[in-house]
Amino acid sequence: MSTTQNHTLNSITQDQVYQTTIPGASHWSTMIRKGTQLRLKDIEGGANVGMLFFNPYQLSEKYNAPDTLKCQHTFKLTKGHCLYSEMGRIFCSVIDDSFGWHETMCGTSHPEHITEKWGQRDYQNHQNNWQQNGFDGFLVELAKYDLYKQDLCSNVNWFSEVSADVEGKLALTRTSQAGDEVVLRFEMDTLVVLHTCPHPLSEVNEYPNKPVAITLTQAEAMMQDDECLNHCSENRRGFENNALYHFGL
């Protein structure tokens, strides 16, 4: 059954560690506080985690994929990169990454993608063996915060690498192995919405029902030699925008 519980950092244990496993074909959301570290781990290999970011106090401020790539002169996301909002602020930084290539251009899977590739299996008829799509998974979580399909934006697909052929056609060329991890340090309070549904370009023979482990802990304080801070001048300006946003708190 799809994971739909909401959790906030305030509900975790006194040792400041929260852990859960998100099954494949599921969705999840939580508000992650500034100074928190989120670790995503592919348990079996072949996972995909679609993820969106919003300012929980001003929901119109959301993740901006074009600016994230443009200002850091990259097509992929990996260690050292920051993820930007539409206001030029930094939601989070990638502080560790064993996979090395995550994409944020291809969007999310829709019902027609799933039906065309693997047939139609819904929860009403197939229960835990259903085949959820990313678009509907996002919508279920967004509705909890009075957000709707018009509030969707380009999402990140963690653990999925794409490449272009000579004609410019994109294809999913690599997915993660069992045990691969990516670690995000949150630079501002952020509403995180995610799903564990297939990448829209997946061509595997069977629906990739792959679970992902989530661990929330307190992050270490950022130092002046931080790789994300010093990756490029735009990142320094992004952190300055965050400092102004948090001024007086």
Image (cartoon, rainbow, N blue to C red):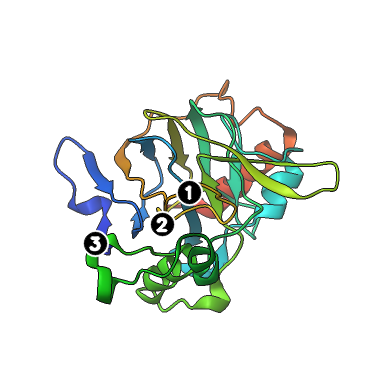
Q: Is residue 203 left or right of residue 26?
A: right
Query: Which of labels 2 and 1 is toward the front?
Result: 1
The residue where tag 1 is placed is 205
The reply to whether callout 2 and callout 1 are in contact (CB within 8 Å) is no
Which numbered marker is on residue 128?
3
Query: Which of labels 2 and 3 is toward the front?
Result: 3
Mark 2 secondary-structure assignment = strand
Amino acid carrying mark 1 in the image:
Asn
Classed neighbour count for the residue bearing mark 3: other residues with Cα under 10 Å, few (<14), some (14–19), many (≥20): some
Q: Position of residue 112 (x, y in %)?
A: 54, 71
Compared with residue 216, is residue 30 higher up or lower down, i.e. above or below? below
Q: Position of residue 18 (x, y in %)?
A: 23, 42
Query: Which of labels 3 and 1 is toward the front?
Result: 1
- How far apart, in angstroms, are the residues tagged by discs 2 and 1? 20 Å
Q: 233 or 18, which lies in front?
A: 18
Q: Between disc 2 and disc 3, whose residue precedes? A: 3
The number of numbered discs placed on residues in the rendered structure image is: 3
- Give me the residue at 61% from left, 60% from top: 154
The residue where tag 2 is placed is 195
Amino acid carrying mark 3 in the image:
Asn
Q: Is residue 223 left or right of residue 106?
A: left
